[in-house]
Image (spheres, rainbow, N blue to C red):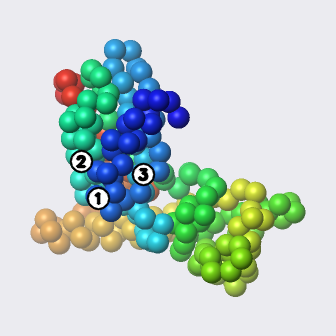
Amino acid sequence: MTQQAEAVRDVVRPAVEAAGLYLEEVTATRAGSRSVVRVTVDLPEDAVGSLDSDQLGEVSRAVSAALDEDDVVPGAYTLEISTPGTSRPLTELRHFKRARTRLVTLKLADGARAEGRLTDVLTDGDAPVLVLDDDRRIDVADVVRGKVEVELKRLEEAQDAEAGELGESAGEGTDDDADGAGFDDATAGRPGRNEEG
């Protein structure tokens, strides 16, 4: 992590935590005459589900205000707030906890593969253990690589549920959620200080 990214992390962490979220990653890079600040946030490790677009918008505004107030990023910048998405590899214990209820594929140290719905992560023993829906138990230490599998059926069900909520609040039913807001790959981009647009 660069010095600037560390400074940005220190400034935005309180805003992210005040929103009840976890600060996953921060990058700060130059793009011509401006900087691009990317902040990845997630729900706390004990939460199941995804951030919705309202939560992402709120934390985006709070992070933007914190950056503008502290002036840790000199000049113009573009701020991108996102969630890890389903493409994030499961490399830390908190990633496995966040993947509860999801279909996962695990590559094990002995070369075997395990696939199933992750129902629990037990941490009360000597070593953390993953519990799959067929009651298989796998030590986290035995997992070389893990990933969440995208389930189109669950995505469609979530879109249908969101469309129903939108229809209730707007007085009509619609399933025009072209931007995928409310799912793990949600991104909120906003121009920073001194930016036009």
Q: Residue furthest left?
A: 171
Q: Is residue 128 left or right of residue 180?
A: right
Q: Quadrant of residue 191?
A: top left
- How far apart in space, not on screen, are marks 3 and 1 (Cα)? 10 Å
Name the residue rendered at 74%, 71% in the picture: 139
Residue 160 picture location, percent across and down: 34, 69
- Residue 62's disc number: 2
- How far apart in space, not on screen, are marks 1 and 2 (Cα)? 8 Å
Q: Residue furthest right?
A: 110
The amino acid on which the numbered mark 1 sits, given as a three-letter code, is Ala
Task: Tell me the SS state at disc 1.
Answer: loop
Q: Is residue 84 left or right of residue 76?
A: right
Name the residue rendered at 48%, 66% in the picture: 45
The amino acid on which the numbered mark 2 sits, given as a three-letter code, is Ala
Q: Which residue corresponds to mark 1?
A: 19
Image height check: is 56 above or below 159? above
- Graded by Cα atoms within 10 Å as few (under 14), some (14 to 19) or many (20 or more), the crowding at tag 3 reads many
Name the residue rendered at 31%, 51% in the picture: 14
